[in-house]
Image: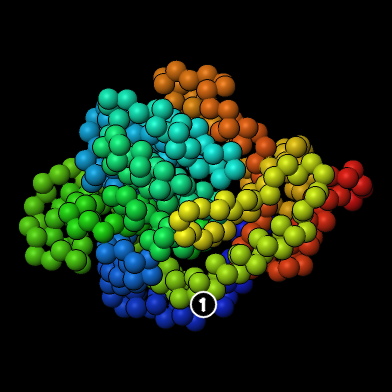
């Protein structure tokens, strides 16, 4: 059993995808064409955003969003120490300086107190990262941002479908991003991403930055703007083939999210009380109305690496999120951190493992994984 596959999903969607791909070939425009415009409009409707700007990856979405929000060389951005490296490397690529903070040990998201303690006179932005199945504590983090006059940029790459008091992830601050990497809740055939925002000027700027800084013909919402290059941008346009696939998969996204929830509930029921499993996913009660969306099913295990090897030997794929905290990675060594600076992030990196979770799975698949986990935990032979 692989950690992820979407073979059955694509088999079911293939007639719709084939029809949309035929339109791409008939149009003869394979980048930033009609399918991309349609997807941007459909995604904006689905999330409730005023604007969705399609780009070629979630990482580029973060870089361009930071630039569009006005990040200047040397500006500091507070980032959790436990997240994918792109959250922090995007800050560097946009010209800023990441400043790390610890996480809440239950939700694995940016801890508001640690974030507040990390603020300096050079801090300009704060980046909550919504991970695994729930959002960061946006009420508390928005309060930190208001008190220190910081811009909030959400790394909501994993968070499609998550909402806070009815507002979709990525739309509580200046803007947010989505990743459509194939394993994501809404996944493409390859890399693709999007910026979400309600701010017309930010959407306009991001639309230009993805197209070499050229205004005009870059965003359907802003026709007739000069086609001159006024800012230094990049080539980060979304491919129409990816947009066509995403349009087809968007039609069943609610169904896929519900399926993920049922599989996650089955895991929780079957793994409860398993020796050596230190923590199952815990959806923290909030004062805000918020909903979990299971991108992955993450547990903490006493012998994480040994468990991963045991499952792999029995044909079950897993993923480690994340093997090393950002503050201890070589690319950020110049920031001068040491082991022990962010203990919750470090503990998560040592103990967490993601079990297979995707709509193509059956409950029998969940039973198989859970039986292997229990066998490993109790020392029984396979």
Residue at which label 1 appears: 14
Please name the residue shown 49% across and 81% down the image.
Answer: 15
**Residue 314 in the figure: left or right of residue 89:** right
Q: Dot 1: few (<14), some (14–19), or many (≥20) neighbours within 10 Å?
A: some
In this rendered view, identify the residue nearer to me: 142 or 73. Answer: 142
* Image quadrant in which you'd find residue 128: top left
Residue with the most extreme right position? 381
Please name the residue shown 41% across and 19% down the image.
Answer: 334
Q: Position of residue 218 (x, y in %)?
A: 20, 60
Please name the residue shown 34% across and 56% down the image.
Answer: 171
Q: Is residue 29 visible?
A: no
Tally of numbered discs: 1
* Image quadrant in which you'd find residue 142: top left
**Residue 363 in the figure: left or right of residue 129:** right
**Residue 81 in the figure: left or right of residue 210:** right
* Image quadrant in which you'd find residue 38: bottom left
Q: Is residue 207 above or below residue 230?
A: below
Colour style of the rendered protein structure: rainbow
Q: Is residue 2 above or below residue 33?
A: above
| SS type, badge 1 | helix
Please name the residue shown 66% across and 60% down the image.
Answer: 264
In this rendered view, identify the residue nearer to me: 151 or 336. Answer: 151
Q: Is residue 276 visible?
A: yes
Q: Is residue 126 above or below residue 217?
A: above
In this rendered view, identify the residue nearer to me: 192 or 103. Answer: 103
């Amino acid at each position: 059993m692989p950690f992820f596959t979407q073979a059955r999903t694509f088999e079911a969607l293939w007639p719709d995808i084939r029809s949309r791909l035929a339109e791409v070939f008939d149009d003869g425009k394979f980048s930033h064409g009609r399918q991309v415009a349609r997807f941007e409009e459909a995604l904006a409707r689905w999330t409730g955003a005023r604007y969705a700007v399609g780009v070629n990856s979630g990482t580029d979405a973060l870089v361009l969003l930071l630039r569009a929000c006005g990040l200047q060389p040397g500006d500091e951005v507070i980032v959790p120490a436990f997240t994918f490296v792109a959250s922090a490397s995007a800050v560097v690529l946009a010209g800023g300086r990441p400043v790390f903070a610890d996480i809440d040990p239950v939700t694995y998201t940016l801890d508001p107190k640690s974030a507040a303690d990390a603020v300096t006179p050079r801090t300009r932005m704060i980046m909550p990262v919504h991970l695994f199945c729930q959002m960061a504590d946006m009420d508390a983090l928005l309060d930190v941002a208001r008190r220190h006059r910081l811009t909030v940029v959400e790394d909501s790459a994993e968070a499609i479908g998550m909402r806070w008091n009815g507002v979709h992830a990525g739309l509580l601050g200046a803007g947010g991003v989505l990743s459509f990497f194939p394993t994501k809740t809404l996944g493409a055939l390859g890399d693709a991403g999007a910026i979400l925002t309600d701010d017309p000027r930010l959407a306009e700027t991001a639309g230009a930055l993805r197209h070499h800084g050229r205004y005009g013909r870059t965003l359907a919402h802003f026709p007739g703007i000069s086609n001159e290059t006024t800012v230094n941008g990049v080539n980060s346009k979304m491919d129409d083939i990816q947009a066509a696939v995403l349009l087809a998969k968007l039609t069943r996204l609610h169904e896929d999210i519900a399926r993920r929830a049922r599989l996650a509930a089955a895991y929780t029921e079957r793994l409860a009380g398993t020796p050596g499993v230190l923590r199952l996913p815990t959806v923290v009660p909030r004062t805000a109305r918020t909903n979990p969306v299971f991108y992955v099913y993450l547990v903490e295990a006493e012998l994480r690496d040994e468990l991963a090897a045991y499952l792999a030997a029995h044909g079950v794929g897993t993923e480690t999120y994340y093997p090393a905290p950002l503050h201890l990675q070589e690319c950020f060594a110049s920031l001068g951190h040491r082991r022990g600076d962010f203990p919750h992030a470090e503990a998560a990196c040592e103990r967490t493992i993601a079990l297979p979770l995707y709509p193509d799975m059956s409950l029998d698949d969940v039973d198989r994984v859970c039986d292997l986990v229990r066998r490993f935990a109790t020392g029984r032979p396979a």
